């Protein structure tokens, strides 16, 4: 079994046993047609691991805190829109949302975990706009989606109580990607 397959097995096991914030059951995975419609709407493809999460494990509802948002349709347990709808809304907002940066999970208080779909390994970014200046609202949460998922599974993410105060580096590509 490859490292990617082992990670997906760990994520699937955790997804089956935990429900973040009100999900009654794990949503069924998306089919190839739904994935194709989502990517056509976005205008870019998802990194392979993100695709596997949605097509093999479930259409959101698992992961840190509130869990991943649904991909194309529906709302999260917290009432957040699906990933594609949220991406388009943020691109049209006054935030200067970077092209190819997909909000996949809502942290609350207008904060989002996002995957940079222009990177092969899906760098994970934190959008934290509560300081008021959109140029200083972006941070590198994890260098890859793999690293981000492992931090969730191992309980070592910045959002864990024992890691309160952990500083994330600013995302330097903010100015060039708006």
Image (tube, rainbow, N blue to C red):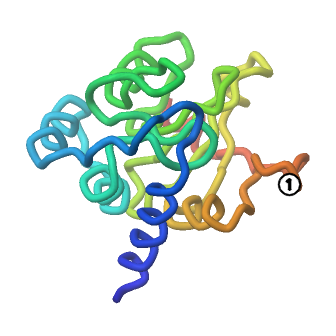
Q: Extreme bottom residue here? A: 1
Residue 36 drawn at (x, y percent)? 13, 42
Rendered residue at 72%/45% (across/down) = 170
Rendered residue at 32%/36% (across/down) = 71
Residue 112 drawn at (x, y percent)? 59, 33
Rendered residue at 54%/31% (across/down) = 22
Quick one: quadrant of the N terminus?
bottom left
Q: Is residue 167 rendered to the left or right of residue 175?
A: right
Residue 53 drawn at (x, y percent)? 35, 55
Label 1: few (<14), some or many (≥20) within 10 Å?
Answer: few
Q: In this view, does 43 lie above or below 7?
A: above
Q: In this view, does 89 lie above or below 1?
A: above
User: Splitting the image into 4 quarters, where does residue 155 fall?
Assistant: bottom right
Q: In this view, does 84 lie above or below 63?
A: above
Q: Nearer the viewer, residue 116 or 73?
A: 73
Q: In this view, does 24 lie above or below 2?
A: above
User: Splitting the image into 4 quarters, where does residue 163 fall?
Assistant: bottom right
Mark 1 lies on residue: 163
Q: Is residue 12 rendered to the left or right of residue 131?
A: left
Helix, strand or loop at label 1? It is helix
User: Splitting the image into 4 quarters, where does residue 149 fall?
Assistant: bottom right
Number of marks in picture: 1
Q: Is residue 112 rendered to the left or right of residue 77?
A: right
Q: Is residue 137 rendered to the left or right of residue 36?
A: right
Q: Nearer the viewer, residue 153 or 157?
A: 153
């Amino acid at each position: 079994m490859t490292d990617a397959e082992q990670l997906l097995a760990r994520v699937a096991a955790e997804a089956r046993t935990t429900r973040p914030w009100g999900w009654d059951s794990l949503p069924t995975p998306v089919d190839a047609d739904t994935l194709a419609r989502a990517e056509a709407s976005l205008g870019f493809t998802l990194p392979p691991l993100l695709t596997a999460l949605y097509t093999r494990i479930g259409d959101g509802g698992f992961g840190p805190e509130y869990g991943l948002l649904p991909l194309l349709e529906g709302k999260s347990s917290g009432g957040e829109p699906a990933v594609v709808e949220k991406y388009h809304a943020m691109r049209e907002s006054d935030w200067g949302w970077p092209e190819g940066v997909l909000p996949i999970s809502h942290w609350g208080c207008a904060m989002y975990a996002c995957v940079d779909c222009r990177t092969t390994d899906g760098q994970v970014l934190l959008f934290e706009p509560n300081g008021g200046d959109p140029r200083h609202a972006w941070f590198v949460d994890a260098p890859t989606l793999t690293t981000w998922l492992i931090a969730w599974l191992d309980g070592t993410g910045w959002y864990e109580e024992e890691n309160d105060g952990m500083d994330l580096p600013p995302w330097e590509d903010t100015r060039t990607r708006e």
